[in-house]
Image: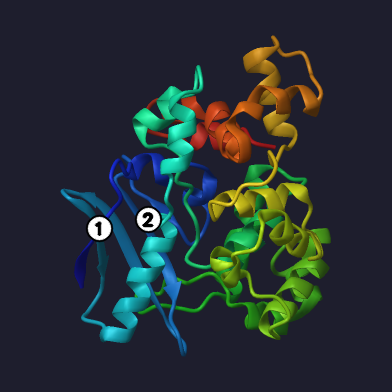
Amino acid sequence: MRVRLDVPRGFSFRRTVLSHGWSLLSPFSLGKKADSLATTVALPGGGAARIVLRKGAGGVWLETRGRPGAAIRGHLMASARRILNLDLDLSPFHAVAASASGLEWIAETGAGRLLRAPTAFEDLVKLVLTTNCSWALTTRMTRALVEAWGEPAADRSRAFPRPEVLAACGERALREIGRTGYRAPHLASIARRVSEGGVDPESWERDGRDPAALKKEMLALPGVGPYVAENLLKMIGRPDGLALDSWMRGRYATLYHGGRAVSDRTISRKYRRMGRWAGLAIWLDLTRDWLDGDDPSEAWESLA
């Protein structure tokens, strides 16, 4: 199957797939020149399918093996649109950025669309796996989860594990096989709550409540602090907070204060003019040079 996906005006495929490190985490696979992105998507009712998204004339092309029926075809197309965040309206953000000195390039280049997983559950777990560790360790933990419990596709690739599978495997297996360390009980609890219906990450994107209310619900989950919750909110276009971590603080100090550490309040003041979009603006500002050259992995490998 090969089908074209319509994209919003000004959409940048490269800026989306390189917006942060997700394209380097299993089961994603990034094309050499960032002109394609592949991943494996779990299918309703069981099984999985490997899809490839390619930059093309007039939009993005979705490719997968065979000729899936209408239901599977629709599921894969919806997954692809979620991955590339194609249905997010960034015009309010770009309108603010266009009049913010030093940030005009964001609107001019169409930046701001953050890469996501096929499901919010996968995004949630991967964010928990980025806390208090190096990027290399995040990569190893994610790969271990996929290889151990991911649903297999026909080409033998695997999707990210479903919540009910992670819930069933238990804390000990998550620690010893998934190599998730102290995060194991957090992940087991999150997976159990999601599989039992106590929390529904997939609903957050269409939830009309104020972002602060969504953030409160996210923070109630074990292992989820402000950094994870605020990044999740940025991914769904409902930013609340700057999602600061040690790397961002250090990067800000290097760019604007000659390496001298400053308070979070000082950082916040600089982006206050961006209003509710401050969290997205700071991320783009601090990672602007990631798109220099063809291989972004060196920048991401330095994360800690």
In the visual, does 55 lie left or right of 28?
left
**Disc 2 residue crowd, few under 14, some 14–19, many 20+, Cα 10 Å:** many
What residue is at 37 percent from the left and 62 percent from the top? Answer: 81
Residue 301 appears in the figure:
no
Amino acid tagged 1? Asp
Residue 301 place in picture, x, y as percent: 58, 37
Residue in the foreground of this view, choosing between 76 and 10: 10
Residue 93 place in picture, x, y as percent: 48, 39
SS of the residue under disc 1: loop
Q: Quadrant of residue 187?
A: bottom right
Query: Which residue in the protein does label 2 denote?
Result: 86
Q: Quadrant of the C terminus?
A: top right
Q: Where 94 falls versus 136 (above or below)?
A: above
**Disc 1 residue crowd, few under 14, some 14–19, many 20+, Cα 10 Å:** some
Residue in the foreground of this view, choosing between 137 and 118: 118
Query: Which residue in the protein does label 1 denote?
Result: 6
What residue is at 51 percent from the left and 22 percent from the top? Answer: 100
Q: Quadrant of residue 1?
A: bottom left
